[in-house]
Image (cartoon, rainbow, N blue to C red):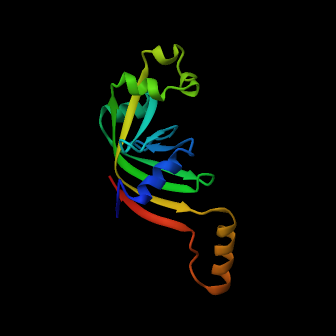
Amino acid sequence: MKDLHSETAEKFFDRMGDVTAGMLMTGDDHHIPMSHYADAEEGVIWFITAKGTAADQAGIEKRNVNYLIAESGAKLYADVRGTLHEVNKPGKLDELWSRAAGAWFEEGRDDPDVRLLCLRPSHAEVWMTDGGAKFVYEIARAHTSGKTPDLGEHEVITF
């Protein structure tokens, strides 16, 4: 296992910046596509959602959730597990607010239904690939040599 300040954790948060969305599993058999804001400094993942959604309810109840990432462009695959909770941090919401987030709310940033959620991971299992030509080479090598392909890093990060 690696910790939050390891090279793997730093690469994970860096690559999360290249990922536009993942699937939030709220623990009630509900899977929600969500855009996120990875915060390496705090070691958390932020979400903006609306009051009354399944994500909001999970945050209010401080549920343990999974956030799944599969993004070939960022060369990142991850299963992030931790506790989701709703927070009241207007400054953080202002910092994260974007035109994309505003498209979901009739009154924009001032809509009373806007909710800020924070996923505080306990751990994340991550796979980081080199992608491209190395993937093709490793698959071809595996078929000719019988060896398992080396497609990159696979580690567990603890937070």
Q: 106 above or below 126?
A: above
**Residue appearing at x 37%, y 36% in the figure:** 118
Identify the image quadrant of the N terminus. Answer: bottom left
**Residue lying farthest to the left in this orientation:** 61
Q: Is residue 113 visible?
A: yes
Q: In which image quadrant can residue 41 be found?
A: top left
Residue nearest the viewer, comparing 58 with 89: 89
Number of numbered tags placed on the structure image = 0
Q: Answer yes or no: is residue 52 visible.
A: no
Left or right for 101, reference 4: right
- Write the residue at 44% across / 59% down: 8
x and y percentages locating residue 35 in the rendered image: 52, 37
Whether 7 is drawn above or below 102: the answer is below
Q: Residue at x 35, y 53 (%)?
A: 4
Along the horizontal axis of the image, is 149 left or right of 109?
right
**Which sits in the foreground, 108 or 58?**
108
Name the residue: 54% across, 22% down.
102
Tell me which corner region of the image, top left, top right, bottom left or bottom right, holds residue 85: top left
x and y, in percent, of residue 117 in the image:
39, 33
Percent from the top left, x then y, of residue 91? 39, 23
